[in-house]
Image (cartoon, helix red, strand yellow):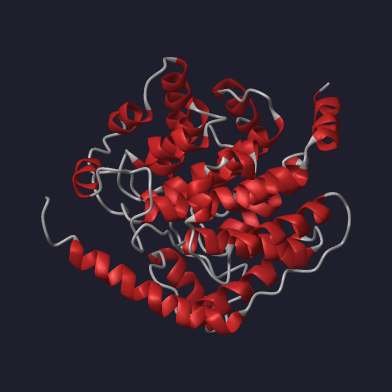
């Protein structure tokens, strides 16, 4: 019965719709949450009363490393042709090249892992012991592609995680996001019980993430808001970058509004904290369910991003959809000369927002 359900899901899934929604959903959520990153919910509301629009570059949005990592994973999947080892090697080279482009705001664990890659460590030994949410932020695209094959999905998630993070909690959290994205893309009405049932065989019952996921499921069933659930975890100052904090909150926002992109993304932004990553994760999952058409058009139109533009993201999704349907595809070319100028502009804007936060309202 389970195998028949899997086969039915593979036959009926609209790969291009799910993958386009996942990639663009990541970018829009990332850009929307970026201005509020590191702020408490109260301070974010005081500084930006209208949370439902971009504030990063006037009324335009730009993406951070969350979107860039999701795109690198998608490119590495294309290069790997379903081979986990090839995926890991290709992703390692993409991380090195990305680092040379002077990106801003790299997570501490990811930074240390990339430095280890640059000085000669292999992808199998470059990771550092951390349970940050870096692997979770780039795992939804793997879930959409390989959710029908759980053993292979787990191998890809492990390779994706351990290249930067070796704490098992980071891997479990990334797997939870991946399976959520698969369910979002294939189930008419996702629910907490279905998610936990799929995750239970793969997450150690002694892992600290598991009881948090159970609490998340109970909270959704009781109709609690995502903000209320976040506060119940002691996250009054905002959701942290610790995977055991961010991933349960993200899954709560998705399961509370599984087909309403705007409501789900704004729900997690209202929790404060690591809002670019949490909004990117929620956006990737809900985007896989609703497709590009379910993402508010004004948010898409005001996404000011290059060379990973809206058009480029959709082209990448098209290639990945053909890859998932069994047609070999090559990675999508990216206009590399634009990377460093873009990143320099981005860095100055980040510094400007940092100085702005020194001023009231507090």
Percent x, y for residue 50? 30, 43
Q: Quadrant of residue 69?
A: bottom right
Determine the residue positioned at 19% across, 63% down.
Answer: 356
Residue 80 locus on image (x, y percent): 77, 65
151 with respect to 202 (left or right): right
Q: Quadrant of residue 78?
A: bottom right
Name the residue rendered at 25%, 70% in the picture.
352
Front residue of this view, candidates 267 and 208: 267
Give the number of callouts: 0
Which quadrant of the rendered structure holds the N terminus? top right
Which residue is found at the position 69% from the left and 27% from the top? 187
Question: Is any atom of residue 346 visible in this view?
Answer: yes
Q: Position of residue 111 (x, y in %)?
A: 44, 71
Q: Is residue 199 left or right of residue 267?
A: right
Q: Of 170 and 125, which appears nearest the observer?
A: 170
Residue sitting farthest toward the right: 327
Name the spot of residue 250 as percent of width and height, x first: 46, 38
Q: Is residue 137 above or below residue 192?
A: below
The answer to whether residue 132 is seen in the rendering is no
């Amino acid at each position: 019965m389970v195998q028949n359900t899997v086969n039915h899901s593979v036959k009926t899934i609209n790969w291009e719709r799910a993958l386009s929604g996942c990639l663009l959903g990541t970018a829009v959520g990332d850009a929307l949450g970026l201005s509020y990153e590191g702020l408490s919910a109260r301070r974010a509301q005081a500084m930006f009363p209208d949370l439902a629009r971009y504030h990063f570059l006037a009324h335009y949005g730009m993406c951070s490393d969350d979107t860039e990592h999701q795109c690198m994973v998608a490119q590495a999947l294309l290069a790997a042709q379903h081979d986990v080892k090839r995926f890991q090697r290709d992703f390692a080279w993409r991380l090195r090249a990305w680092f040379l482009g002077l990106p801003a705001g790299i997570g501490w664990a990811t930074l240390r892992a990339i430095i280890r890659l640059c000085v000669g460590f292999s992808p199998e030994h470059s990771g550092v012991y951390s349970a940050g949410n870096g692997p979770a932020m780039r795992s939804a695209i793997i879930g959409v592609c390989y959710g029908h094959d759980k053993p292979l999905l787990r191998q890809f998630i492990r390779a994706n995680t351990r290249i930067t993070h070796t704490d098992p909690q980071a891997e479990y959290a990334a797997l939870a996001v991946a399976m959520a994205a698969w369910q979002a893309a294939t189930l008419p009405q996702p629910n907490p019980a279905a998610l936990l049932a799929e995750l239970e065989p793969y997450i150690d019952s002694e892992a600290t993430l598991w009881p948090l996921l159970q609490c998340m499921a109970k909270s959704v069933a009781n109709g609690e808001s995502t903000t209320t659930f976040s506060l119940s975890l002691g996250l009054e100052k905002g959701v942290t970058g610790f995977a055991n904090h961010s991933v349960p909150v993200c899954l709560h926002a998705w399961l509370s509004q599984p087909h309403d992109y705007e409501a789900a993304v704004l729900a997690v932004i209202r929790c404060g904290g690591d809002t670019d990553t949490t909004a990117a994760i929620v956006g990737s999952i809900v985007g896989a369910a609703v497709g590009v058409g379910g993402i508010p058009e004004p948010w898409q139109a005001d996404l000011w991003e290059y060379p990973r533009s809206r058009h480029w993201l959709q082209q990448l999704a098209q290639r990945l959809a053909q890859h998932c349907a069994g047609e070999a595809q090559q990675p999508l070319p990216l206009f590399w000369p634009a990377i460093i100028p873009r990143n320099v502009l981005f860095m100055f804007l980040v510094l400007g927002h940092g100085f702005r936060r020194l001023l009231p309202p507090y």
